[in-house]
Image: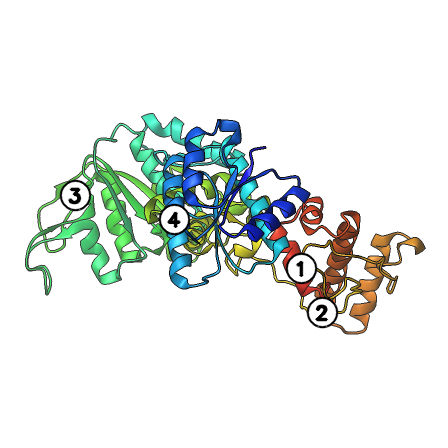
Amino acid sequence: MKPIWIVDDDQSIRFVLEKALLRERLPTRSFSNPRDVLAALQTAPDEDSPQVLVSDIRMPGGSGLDLLEKVKIRYPGLPVIIMTAYSDLDSAVSAFQGGAFEYLPKPFDLPKAVELIRRAVEESQREEIVEDRIEEAPEMLGQAPAMQDVFRAIGRLSQSLVTVMITGESGSGKELVARALHKHSARANGPFIAINTAAIPKDLLESELFGHERGAFTGAQTMRRGRFEQADGGTLFLDEIGDMPFELQTRLLRVLSDGHFYRVGGHSAIKTQVRVIAATHQNLEQRVKDGVFREDLFHRLNVIRLRLPPLRERKEDISMLTRHFLQKSAQQLGGETKRLSDAALACLETFPFPGNVRQLENICHWLTVMAPSQVVEPDDLPPEIIPTAAPASVAVPAVIPATVAAEAPISIAKPAKSNAIADSDSGNWEELLELEARNMLELGRTDAWNAIIARAESRLILAALANTKGRRIEAATQLGIGRNTITRKIQELGLE
C-alpha cells in the first residue's frame, strides 16, 4: 500500500500520528512544510505517491489550504485531511470548498483520527479501482428484471405509434418512459409536449389542452394554441390522466377518435396528428366503476399498458441510481462526488422509498450538500432514512471502563449472565428470545422491541470488542457495520 503523507511543522504531532498509524500497519512519510511536499510529488514514483495526505493548515513557509489546491490539480481523487488548531468557520469552509476529505480540529482524539485516516484510505483505494467520470446521463437506469421488461417493451413499441398507458406510483419515472417512447419512435424529430392534468385548475385545463380564440373568455386578449396543436407531428404526454374532469374526458375522446378539435370559443375544426401517451398512479378500472372516468375513454387509452415498478421492487437498482444521482448532484452543485459506504447503502436498500426514484434523487441532493465527508456513513443519512435508535436509558450489562487512555485498546471483561437472552447454555437462544419477548409483553411493557434490540446489540458489540482486544475499527469490520455506527452505538448503549 502507498504511504500516508503527514505534513505538520510540529514534530510531536508527526511522531504521534506515525506511531499510531504504524500500529495499524499503515506506512507513513512525514514532512515539516508544504514546499517539501510539492517537491516530493514531482519526483516520487507512483508506488511512493500518497495514499492519503494529512496536512496542518498553518505552517511556516506555506498554507495547508494552498497545498490542498495544488495537490488537487495533480491528484483530484486524493483524499486530503486538513488539521488545524484554529477551529474557525472560515478555515472549515475553505477546506471543504477546496475539496478536503475531512476537517480535523486540534487537539484531536487519536483513535478517532486513525479511524478517519482509515476511512480516507478506503476511499482512495476505491478511487483507484473505479474512476468517477461524469458521463452523459442515460435516459433510464435499471438492471432489475422488472425494469428490463419495461426496456424491452419500449424497444418493441419503437416502430409503432399506438397509444400507450403508463401506470406506476408517483415518483417512479413515468415521464422518463414517455420521453423514451417518443425518442425511439418515428416521431422523434417532432415535439414532445407534456402536461400534468392534475396540476392545472379545472377552469384552465380546457384552454391548456385545446387553446382558445381571442375574446373567448375574460382575459383572453389574444388567440392561443393549445397543447394538441403544439404537439402536432409529435407526442403529447398526459400525466395523471385519472384526475381529468369528467366533462373534458368527452372532448379528449373525440380528439382520439378522429383527430379533430375546436379551440375554446372557436368554430373551425382543427386537424392534428398526435401520438398520445397517458400516465396515472391511480386504479383507472376502479375509477370507471366509481363513475368518475369514462369507460370508453379508458379503453381508448389502454391499448398498450406499461407498468413501471416502484423502487422497493427493484432494490438491486438502488446502488446504481444512487451513484448516478450523486454524480449528477456534484456536477450541478460544483462539488466532488460523494460515495456511500456499504453500511449506508444497506440502510438505503432497506428503506421503502414511498416517493420512489424521485425521493432517492432528492436524498442524493441532500447528501451532496449536507454529508460531512466524501464517504457517506449511515449516521450521515437524512433522519427519515436512519432506523430509530434504541433509547440510551435501556439497561445493558456494560463492563467497559468509563475512562480509557487515548492510545490504549479498550479493556473488556466477560459480561455476567443476567437474563434469558444471555444464558445461552440453558437452551436454544432463539427460543429463549421468544420466551423473553412473551414475558415482557405479558407484563404489559410497550418497549419490548427497543429493549431486546438494545440488549442484543450490546452483546454483539461486546463480543466483537473482546475478539479484537478492544479495537473498535476491527470490531466494526467484523460485525459488518460502519465505524461511526459502532462508536454511536457504544455511546447510546452505555458501553463507554
> Counting residues from the N terminus, which is met first, the one under dot 3 or under dot 4?
4
Pick out the residue farthest to the bottom: 444
Q: Which mark is residue 489?
A: 1
Amino acid at the residue labelled 3: Glu
Quadrant assignment for the C terminus: bottom right
Helix, strand or loop at label 4? It is strand
Q: Tag 2: residue type?
A: Asp
**Residue topped by disc 3:** 229
Asked if marks 3 and 2 touch (Cβ < 8 Å), the reply is no
Among numbered discs 1 and 4, the one appearing first in the sequence? 4
Up-down: is 217 above or below 309? below
Assess whether mark 4 and mark 1 are in contact (beta carbons under 8 angstroms): no
Position of 302 with respect to 418 (left or right) is left
Label 4, on which residue? 62
Residue 286 seen in the figure:
yes
Residue 167: tell me if it is visible: no
What separation in Å lies between label 1 and label 4 (alpha carbons)? 40 Å
Report which residue position mark 2 lands on.
Answer: 447
